[in-house]
Image (cartoon, helix red, strand yellow):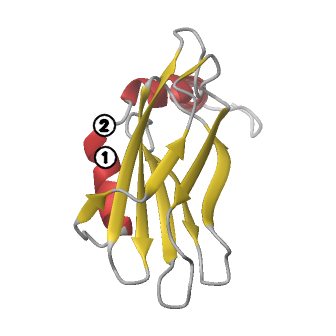
Amino acid sequence: MNQHSIDPLQRRNFLYTCAKTAVLLLTYPYRTLLAGGSPNDARKWLNQQTNGAVSQEGKISIDIPPVTKRGDFIPITVRVDSPMTEQNYVKAIHIAAQRNPTPAIGSFFFSPANPEAVVTTRIRLVKTQVIEVVAVMSNGSVWTSKARTKIFTGAKGCS
């Protein structure tokens, strides 16, 4: 064996490792979609954001299409009824998707300088599911609301 030749066993191990890595990388998006999430995952994330505070329903309106063909581009608007004064304002809005592999959609923070507590964005959803929103107020109260959107089969969601 000369100094430039590679041991066949080392070469075989290297090729095996490369092939295994390629398969893992190519199948990762599908494994993530198949893993899915659960309402418990969303609730756990929301509880972390609110330090486990007890929430009550109300004050939040969620505008999301009840039915859509595009799960990868869904418009959503969240409004919280608040005067947005120094004494009474929305500190944060947290949005979670109950069936996404990662339930956290986002957290948005406010101050009394904001004229209103409104979030407008677009989100990606894997499949038909419930969106849960939690608003944390300056007085420590926590409010919640839910909305459901249906994604037509074959719309591909986050794929």
Residue 87 in sight here: yes
Query: Image point 59% across, 17% down: which residue?
Result: 156
Farthest residue toward the top? 154
Closer-to-camera residue (139/103): 139
Question: Left or right: where does residue 5 sit relative to residue 17?
Answer: right
Q: What residue type is labelled 2?
A: Ser
At 68% from the left and 30% from the top, the residue drawn is 1
Q: Residue furthest front?
A: 83
Horizontal and vertical percent position of residue 144: 35, 56
Q: Residue 85's x, y, as percent?
A: 56, 85
Instruction: Tell me if residue 1 comes above or below residue 154 in the rendering.
Output: below
Asked where in the image residue 108 lies, by quadrant, the reply is bottom right
Nearer the observer, 151 or 5: 151
Q: Quadrant of the C terminus?
A: top right
Q: In this view of the protein, which residue sits in the foreground, 159 or 77?
A: 77
In the image, taking residue 31 as reference, residue 17 lies left or right, namely: right
Which SS class for mark 1?
helix
What is the C-alpha distance between the residues marked 1 and 2? 5 Å
* Residue under the point 67% across and 48% down: 121
Seen in the picture, residue 138 relative to 125 is either above or below; the reply is below
Query: What count of labels does the image hold?
Result: 2
Asked which secondary structure carries label 2, the reply is loop
For the residues bearing labels 1 and 2, Cβ distance under 8 angstroms: yes
Q: What residue type is labelled 1?
A: Asp
Residue occupied by mark 1: 41
> In this figure, which residue is indicated by the disc labeled 2?
38
Q: Is residue 13 visible?
A: no
95 above or below 129? Answer: below
Q: Where is residue 137 in the image (x, y as percent from the top left)?
A: 42, 75
